[in-house]
Image (tube, helix red, strand yellow):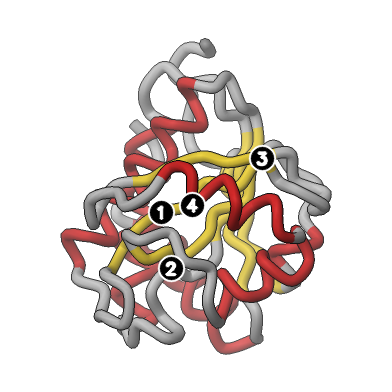
Amino acid sequence: MRGKMSAAGRIEILQGDLTEMDVDAVVNAANNDLQLGGGVAGAIRRKGGPRIQAECDAIGTIPVGGAAITTGGNLKARHVIHAASMQLGGRTSAQALRNSTAHALRIAAQQGLKTIAFPAVGTGIAGFPLRECAGIMLREAVRHLAGATSIEKVYFVLFDPEALEVFQQAFRELDAAGQSTP
């Protein structure tokens, strides 16, 4: 475990394909039944292969706001952390997003992982507002990095330029408010 460090330089926001990230873990925007359907989960299922869904089936249902870890299957990432921010077919709430993001970071640290990549959880199929998502997820990452953790780098990998700009703006606002450092 590493000691306290500032989040500056440890959070990177970029546009790209989450499933192509060569990191210790990518985060799946999951439902609590861990069924890899559409959106980010579908992309992870297609590129990662059937092993990831088979491991999810073995885990079973987890609480909304929870998270679970599987291998990365055929992905470059060694693991997938499934952050359950909604029920199957449901919507994401701020509390579920906050809890599932924090839980995903805790699982990564408990496993001694150094790098983790998140999508904008809950903003696709689950319909959560992008701006609110950015603020919640970035605050949770900053909060986690302020404590002792094995995580050295947190990536936010956004699919399109609009999401990239929203996350960058939210991080600038946290930084300006002095909230990106412990």
Mark 2 or 3, nearer chain start: 3
Q: Is residue 33 visible?
A: yes
Mark-to-mark CA distance, 1 and 3: 14 Å
| Label 3 crowd (10 A; few <14 / some 14-19 / many >=20) | some
Q: Does the residue at mark 1 contact the one at mark 2 (Cβ under 8 Å)? A: yes
Q: Is residue 94 left or right of residue 170?
A: left
Of 134 and 106, the residue lying toward us: 106
Of 87 and 114, the residue lying toward us: 87
Q: Is residue 93 above or below residue 72?
A: below
| Residue that carries the numbered disc 1 in the rendered image | 83
> Which residue is pictured at 57% across the width and 19% down the height?
112
- Type of the residue with mark 2: Val
| Label 1 crowd (10 A; few <14 / some 14-19 / many >=20) | many
- Is label 4 in a helix, a strand or a loop? helix
- Type of the residue with mark 4: Asp
| Residue that carries the numbered disc 2 in the rendered image | 121
Mark 4 or 3, nearer chain start: 4
Q: Quadrant of the C terminus?
A: top left
| Residue that carries the numbered disc 3 in the rendered image | 71
- Type of the residue with mark 1: Ala
Mark 4 or 2, nearer chain start: 4
Q: Does the residue at mark 4 contact the one at mark 2 (Cβ under 8 Å)? A: no
Q: Quadrant of residue 47?
A: bottom right
Q: Quadrant of residue 85?
A: bottom left
